[in-house]
């Protein structure tokens, strides 16, 4: 039993992706970017908000991905999927799923006899909707369910919500709102730990030139209510709408998410896309590899 408890404590510490004390915030996995393109451009997660996507011209966008997450640290396999569908010019829906599976550990009883094994898991489910108020302004909300299963008998859940307003001006989009605002998680002794809620401000700009070239650049700042700040910058270069190169940087200052540099490549043909991302410059999540595929029109 003592060995099981020790392993759980070690898992909790490893799962803390940040410079803060690992016990200072619950459900840090809930702010991991779940889209490969987003991950490779500095983690600009607001770009995936349903209100922002509604201001584009995409009718349907579905993606699935696998991450080899933090292979030198927490070391989990992450399975992700997201979907966006435009019901009309004014209304859109979205959904997102994430499952993070940590390495399994052996279970021992009070007498020290091995009694099986268990793989800790984190799960995130999001459902969202957005409405276009005017041709250039939209608002949207996402409801979140989060669960951490640490042992076969110990799990924690929380609920949260994102509320984002977005506006577009030519090739530029701006967005602001709150993310992950929700319930706290209580430990067995009654101590409550908040989830990483934040006030968010983001902007993106797209420009095309010389017929076949495009650049999409963006920035995002998250001010966490529990203290700390995360700022991200990302750039995507596209050639003829077929191949893409991406780079991003995410700066975490006492944040639930660490500082890292991201690199990415992508290709798209007839609506089918393939994307890859690689993270460096972080002792916590460095060498993370992400691969994904999607379809959009």
Image (cartoon, rainbow, N blue to C red):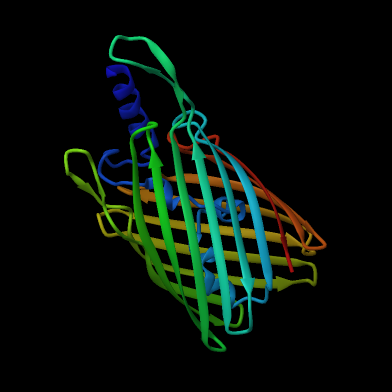
Q: Residue at x 59, y 58 (%)?
A: 82
Q: Quadrant of residue 118?
A: top left
Horizontal and vertical percent for residue 129?
Answer: 51, 73
Quarter of the rendering occupied by the C terminus: bottom right
From what the image shows, is residue 211 above or below residue 44?
Answer: below
Q: Is residue 207 above or below residue 89?
A: above
Quarter of the image with the N terminus is top left
In this rendering, the count of numbered labels is: 0
Up-down relation of residue 1 to residue 271 (above or below): above
Q: Nearer the viewer, residue 99 or 270?
A: 99
Is 261 positioned to the left or the right of 237 in the image?
left
Please report the residue visible at 68 percent of the width from the left and 60 percent of the height from the top: 237
Q: Where in the figure is residue 56, as x and y percent of width and height? A: 63, 76
Residue 62's x, y, as percent?
66, 60
Q: Residue at x 51, y 53 (%)?
A: 42
**Residue positioned most to the bottom:** 134
Residue 149 in the image: state x and y as whole percent.
Answer: 40, 38
Which image quadrant is residue 112 in?
A: top left
The answer to which quarter of the image holds residue 152 is top left
Q: Is residue 80 left or right of residue 122?
A: right
175 and 131: which one is in front? 131
114 or 37: nearer the viewer: 114
Determine whether 162 is above or below 224 in the image. Answer: below
| x 33%, y 33%: residue | 13
Left or right: 73 with respect to 156?
A: right
């Amino acid at each position: 039993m003592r060995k099981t408890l020790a392993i759980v404590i070690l898992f909790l510490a490893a799962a803390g992706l940040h410079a803060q004390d690992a016990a200072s915030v619950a459900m840090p996995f809930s702010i991991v970017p779940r889209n490969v393109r987003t991950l490779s451009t500095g983690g600009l997660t607001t770009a995936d908000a349903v209100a922002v996507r509604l201001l584009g011209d995409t009718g349907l966008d579905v993606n699935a991905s696998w991450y080899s997450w933090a292979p030198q640290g927490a070391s989990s396999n992450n399975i992700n999927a997201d979907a966006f569908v435009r019901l009309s010019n004014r209304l859109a829906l979205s959904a997102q799923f994430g499952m993070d599976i940590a390495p399994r550990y052996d279970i021992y009883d009070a007498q020290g006899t091995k009694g099986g094994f268990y793989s800790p898991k984190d799960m995130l489910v999001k459902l969202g909707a957005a409405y276009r108020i005017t041709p250039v302004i939209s608002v949207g909300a996402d409801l979140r369910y989060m669960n951490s299963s640490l042992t076969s008998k110990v799990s924690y859940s929380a609920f949260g919500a994102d509320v984002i307003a977005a506006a577009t001006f030519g090739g530029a989009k701006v967005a602001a709102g709150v993310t992950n605002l929700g319930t706290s998680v209580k430990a067995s002794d009654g101590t409550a730990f908040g989830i990483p809620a934040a006030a968010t401000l983001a902007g993106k700009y797209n420009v095309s030139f010389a017929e076949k070239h495009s650049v999409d650049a963006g920035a995002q700042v998250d001010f966490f209510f529990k203290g700390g700040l995360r700022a991200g910058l990302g750039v995507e270069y596209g050639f003829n709408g077929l191949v893409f190169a991406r780079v991003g940087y995410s700066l975490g200052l006492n944040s639930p998410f660490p500082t890292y540099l991201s690199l990415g490549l992508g290709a798209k043909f007839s609506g089918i896309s393939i994307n890859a991302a690689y993270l460096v410059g972080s002792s916590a999540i460095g060498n993370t590899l992400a691969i994904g595929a999607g379809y959009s029109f």
